[in-house]
Image (cartoon, coloured by chain):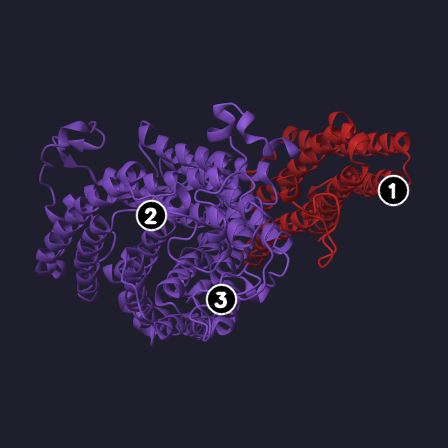
Chain colours: A purple, B red
Amino acid sequence: MNEKHHSHDLPFWRKYIFSLDHKVIGIQYGVTGLLFLFFGFCLMMLMRWQLAYPGQPLPLLGNLFSERMMVGGIMLPEFYNQLGAMHGTIMVFLGVVPLAVGGFGNYLVPLQIGAPDMAFPKLNMMSYWVYFLGGVTMIASFFLPEGAAQSGWTSYPPLANIATSGQTVWLVGMVLLITSSLLGSINFIVTIVQLRADGLSFFRLPFFVWAQFVTSFLLLLAFPPLEAAGVLQLMDRLAGTSFFMPSGLVVAGNPLVVSGGGNPLLWQHLFWFLAHPEVYVLILPAMGIVAEIFATNTRKPIYGYKSMVCSVIFLGFMSFIVWAHHMFLTGMSAKMSAFFQITTMIISIPSVIVLTALALSLWGGSIRFNTPMLFAVAFLPMFGIGGLTGLPLGLAASDIHLHDTYYVIGHFHYVVAPGTIFALFAGVYHWYPKVTGRKMSEVLGKIHFFLSIVLINGIFMPMFILGLAGVSRRLYDQMQYAHAQPTQPLNVFISICAWLLGLAQIPFVINFFGSLIWGKKVERNPWQATTLEWAAPSPPPHGNFDTVPQVYRGPYEYSVPGLKHDFWPQNMAQEN
Amino acid sequence: MSDNAIRYISKPHPVTGVTNSKLGIWCFLASEVMFFGGLFSAYVLLRASAPSWPRGSDLLNVPLATLNTLVLITSSVTMVMAWASLALKDFSKYKRYMAATILLALVFLVVKSIEYAHKFEHHYFPATNTFYAIYFTLTGLHGLHVLGGVVVNTYFLFPGSALWKNDPEQFQGRIECAGLYWHFVDLVWIFLFPVLYLL
């Protein structure tokens, strides 16, 4: 283990590519995650053309695509389905989770608990490279003769079982991504349990660390059943088994030659057993980031820290017993749906506690409205809308109307896009000085924020209307359906907002790379924050801290009466 | 910065009472429980929804599987003995027991492949019916876990054992982790055997 502390002797490829340092791995995860987010966003911008102007050739870019994607610039239905399936997969498994857990978690957790590195540096490096391989596999599937997976990100059989070869590659990619998540989550749990600095008891941990801790348990325990399901579907596709294939299936007028006896619902159970906890994997790190930024920028302690911690633990437990609310329409018995309705209503309580505590944390604070704080504050109403619109979906009666419509799309995008992704942007602006030693531009940051918040609502708010009008989420051309035709102008509006939102990210890109060169240089603690990462130099060297930190108090000692400064770092023995 | 190295690699944490790798392997085993738990629930659901289900003992070779069960249990014992020999500072005994563990694991895999070969000869494949599908998938995945154990244990028998000279405490910890994994693989088989062969 000692060799890693002599980093300056290492050759370039060991220091920056196959690095064992949690900070380098965190940056690798973060940058890769941002690139995948952008790629997934591009897929969606292509889809938006077909949705706004169905059957019209795509200007300028249309000729760049091959014959099996677009003919004369007109998108083929198969390609549209590939875009949809891969947009979901990439955004969830290759974008948001790697950025939130792999990126922010890897970089910040060891720093915030005062550890020199993660508990298993080699495992850490491996989990990044397995993730990278999984990502490459997913992207490569677009270049298969029959294209990428096209059965939606949920890959429901029997459709997925009889889909083209892209689905097999999707499954292999998923197995790699799941393996990477497992390795990462073990590392996080061990690091947080074993490597906290002296004096840093569990209830002195920053809320962000708690969020990552619970997230790791969700990844550890919810992902394996999907891995099992993935193996079973691979067997179905490659070895001819019928785990998910019922007897007597007829496809395109021809009876399917399989042994039968399988059950397509089995896949849905195994899939949602992962995918519902996955929702909390997406949201918990975002809540953690927002809590840190709120405490720093309101200059007061987080309201109800302990109830927030208990809430996320409870949330973690509950998230394992709500999965079948995604399956109300599968003909499950009324007793089953009653059970899952009740658990679904219960799980909204801890979310509301966290959100309320965060909102109350703003009360009476002297708020600094810098860019990270703007994004973090915007998280509250955006996640609030996402959460509240989820309640009608959790009740079986209203779900029957809303299921698989654009209402669902609007609902979960409010949670993840202006919710989680805004929190992730907030985190990038907030910790950029720690990672690079320079601040990002406030002017560009505010342009980025105000354009994004307006445009993103322009995208997702009309989707509720589309959904209430009964427009299915999976339509290639909604003009084919009489009930959907009157809402078509909304689709044009959504698409224009989406493309403008793409342009609105240009200030962020300029800011992100430009600030490396012209950003204002900062000292250790530019925001005057209390948690341990600000006690390390910016950027922190190998081993992170000059002296082994000792912790004396809780994470959010701001504006303590009688002290000279309005912040009291966790590692300061006496008042400074 | 030498005082700021990663702690609890070979010495246990005073509060949790375990080393990093021991906590790590327990977490890993928890995820493995969920993995096989998912597969077993798939088995239960498929069997419960099937109109008829064959008795495993009519289709599968119970005596061979009983032999394999004994082989695997014995290998668990030799694995414990390998670890205990390290605790008694007897390195040559460790090598003998570890070699025996690997050998028994290989015997298990050979017997398993003989079973597979018999099935293939009689044209029983995963695609034959749902029973064979779940049989081949579950035993195949378990077999992969056995193979993984063989690879890890072989590493600790030959190149990995160099650590014994530098840090015996850490090496003993590693063998304990490998042992925990090996017992888990054994335990999965203890569930698989009655579920597939007898019920």
Q: Label 3 is placed on what type of residue? A: Val
Dot 2, crowdedness within 10 Å: few (<14), some or many (≥20)?
some
Output the chain of dot 2. A
In the image, taking residue A352 as reference, residue B98 lies left or right, namely right
Please name which of the two marks, 1 or 2, marks the residue nearer to the observer.
1
Residue for point 33% across, 74% down: A397
- Identify the disc placed on residue A88: 2
- Identify the disc placed on residue A246: none
**Among the 4 quarters of the image, the one containing residue A47:** top left
Residue for point 41% across, 63% down: A291
Q: Marks 3/2: CA distance?
A: 25 Å
Residue A75 drawn above or below residue A381: above
Output the chain of dot 3. A
Dot 1, crowdedness within 10 Å: few (<14), some or many (≥20)?
some
Please name which of the two marks, 3 or 2, marks the residue nearer to the observer.
3
| In-front residue for pair A355/A93 | A355
**Among the 4 quarters of the image, the one containing residue A169:** top left
Residue denoted by label 3: A312
